[in-house]
Amino acid sequence: MNEILFLIHILVVILFLFVALRLGKNYLLVFAAILALIANLFVIKQIDLFTKTVTATDVFIIGAIFSQNLLQEYFGKEIAIKTIKITFFSMLFF
C-alpha cells in the first residue's frame, strides 16, 4: 500500500512541477521553496517502502532538486542561485 501511495505522490509532485514551470519562473521558485519546507517538516516520519525504511521527505527533496534543475535549464543560472538562497533562508527562519 505504501508503494502505491509513494508512486501517486511522485506523480502529483511532477504534475505540479510542470504546472509551475508552465506558469513561470516565480511559481517554480516558490514551489521549490515550499517543497523544501515540507521536506523539513516530514524528516522525522519514517515509512516502509519496498522493504526498506525511508523518510517521508524523499519525494519532496527530489521535487525541490528537480525544480531547481528546471529553473537553471529554462531561466538561467542566476535564477537558480536566487532560488537556492531563498530556499535556504526560508528553511533557516521557518
Image: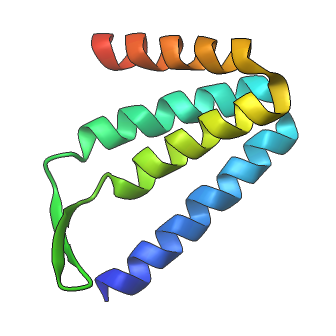
- Examine the rendering and report whether any part of residue 94 can be seen: no
Please determine whether, in this image, residue 23 is positioned above or below residue 3.
above
Total marks shown come to 0
Give coordinates of residue 21: x percent, y percent: 79, 41
Please determine whether, in this image, residue 25 is positioned above or below residue 66.
above
- The residue shown at (16%, 55%) is 45
Give coordinates of residue 69: x percent, y percent: 65, 38
Q: Quadrant of the N terminus?
A: bottom left
Q: Is residue 73 left or right of residue 6?
A: right
Give coordinates of residue 75: x percent, y percent: 82, 25
- The residue shown at (72%, 39%) is 70
- The residue shown at (83%, 33%) is 74
Please determine whether, in this image, residue 14 is positioned above or below residue 11.
above
Please determine whether, in this image, residue 68 is positioned above or below residue 44.
above
Q: Quadrant of the C terminus?
A: top left
- Examine the rendering and report whether any part of residue 84 can be seen: yes
Furthest-bottom residue in view?
1
Give coordinates of residue 35: x percent, y percent: 47, 39
Colour logic: rainbow
Q: Is residue 80 left or right of residue 60?
A: right
